[in-house]
């Protein structure tokens, strides 16, 4: 009998795993190159990284942050890579304050936007920053205030010009809007990196998808591995996760806990069925559960379903209705 502490530890191990599947690894290598390019030449490279929720954007920034950690010496604090999470209701003011907090400024709340920007630039130089990642950039586009994207685009253009460090803007697909409305900023981000879900219609992507699931299953180390040889299980797993890393992890961990609670030697379809409804989508039962015999056999991306993706305009309209 495996103890609850061991079950929890295995779950924690999986959550901390970095699975460098090709899409993730391509983005990782390009951003690392931007960091080293700045370090070696003094010149900046800027990238836009976009992808659906669950494709691993935040995991990517966290992983890079651990690879290039802040250090302290007699000359002060050295922050080679700065990761800034955009506030949920961002303005230039609170974004500047968030950067100052990350840079260790105890008086982050003082001064005008111009004064805060000046301090940010001074600290960027003092901390020897080589790369800045702005995560959750789509929060600017999601605002009802139509002026916000234009204002932040101008502010970012000015900051990037003066800071002269490599910069990565990261967010959902609508993040592209920030570049679309500002040609000068767009020219500075000539390379876009897309983190895409796994695609079963592509043989290479299908193999990668099943490889990721196999790696997670091996990390969970149950006596009986999940049988991935059947074509039907691959389709069911893809319907249940949409090929997104975040949902793959949720489903596998949920099924793992259910298997252990039933004292089963491994994850079976019943565990996956309950794991989907308990840990992925509470409404995913019966014909809306990919592991149920009555499943509709279609992608769960229609309105009201878990993988439905509203347009940028729809997001803005819905936010306006809530105000």
Image: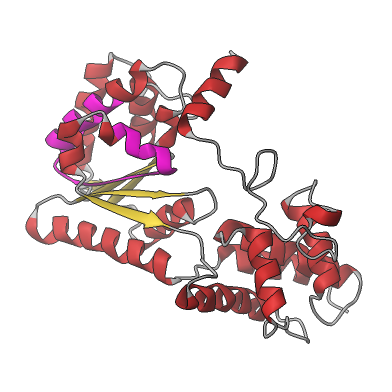
Q: Nearer the viewer, residue 298 or 213?
A: 298
Residue drawn where x is 81% and y is 76% of the image: 268
User: How far from the left and from the top, in percent, is residue 274?
Assistant: 84, 61
User: How far from the left and from the top, in percent, is residue 260?
Assistant: 85, 72
- Quadrant assignment, res 248: bottom right
Q: Which residues are magenta?
A: 152-178
Describe residue 92's horizontal placement relative to residue 237 as left or right.
left
User: How far from the left and from the top, in percent, is residue 323?
Assistant: 58, 13
Residue drawn where x is 30% and y is 25% of the image: 152
Residue 167 in the magenta stretch? The answer is yes
Describe residue 113's horizontal placement relative to residue 307 as left or right.
left
Residue drawn where x is 46% and y is 77% of the image: 204
The quadrant of the picture occupied by the N terminus is: bottom right
Describe residue 273's horizontal placement relative to residue 318 as left or right.
right
Q: Nearer the viewer, residue 318 or 66?
A: 318
Query: Does 39 sit above or below residue 182?
Result: below
Query: Does 30 sit above or below residue 190?
Result: below
Describe residue 220's horizontal placement relative to residue 176 as left or right.
right
Report the magenta stretch's main SS: helix
User: How far from the left and from the top, in percent, is residue 33?
Assistant: 22, 63
Work out whether residue 104 can be spotted: no
């Amino acid at each position: 009998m495996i103890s609850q502490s061991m079950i929890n530890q295995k779950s924690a191990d999986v959550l901390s795993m970095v699975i460098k599947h090709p899409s993730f690894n391509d983005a990782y290598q390009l951003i690392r190159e931007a960091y080293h390019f700045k370090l070696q030449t003094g010149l900046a490279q800027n990238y836009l990284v976009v992808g659906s929720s669950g494709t691993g954007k935040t995991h990517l920034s966290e992983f890079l942050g651990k690879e290039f950690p802040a250090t302290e010496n007699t000359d002060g604090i050295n922050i080679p890579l700065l990761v800034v999470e955009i506030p949920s209701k961002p303005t230039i003011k609170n974004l500047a304050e968030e950067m100052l907090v990350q840079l260790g400024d105890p008086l982050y709340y003082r001064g005008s936007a111009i004064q805060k920007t000046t301090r940010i630039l001074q600290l960027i130089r003092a901390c020897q920053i080589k790369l800045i990642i702005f995560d959750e950039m789509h929060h600017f586009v999601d605002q009802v205030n139509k002026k916000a994207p234009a204002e932040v685009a101008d502010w970012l253009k000015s900051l990037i010009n003066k800071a002269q460090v490599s910069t990565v803007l990261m967010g959902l697909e609508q993040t592209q809007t920030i570049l679309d409305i500002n040609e000068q900023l767009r020219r500075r981000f000539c390379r876009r990196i897309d983190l895409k879900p796994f695609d079963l219609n592509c043989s290479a992507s299908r193999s990668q998808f099943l490889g990721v699931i196999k790696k997670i299953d091996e990390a969970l180390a149950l006596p009986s591995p999940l049988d991935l040889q059947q074509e039907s299980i691959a389709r069911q797993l893809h319907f249940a996760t949409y090929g997104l890393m975040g949902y793959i992890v949720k489903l596998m961990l949920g099924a793992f806990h259910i298997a252990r609670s039933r004292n089963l030697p491994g994850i079976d379809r019943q565990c996956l069925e309950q794991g989907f409804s308990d840990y992925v989508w509470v409404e995913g039962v019966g014909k809306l559960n990919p592991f149920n015999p009555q499943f509709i056999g279609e992608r769960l991306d229609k309105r009201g379903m878990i993988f439905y993706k509203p347009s940028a305009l729809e997001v803005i309209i819905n936010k306006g209705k809530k105000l």
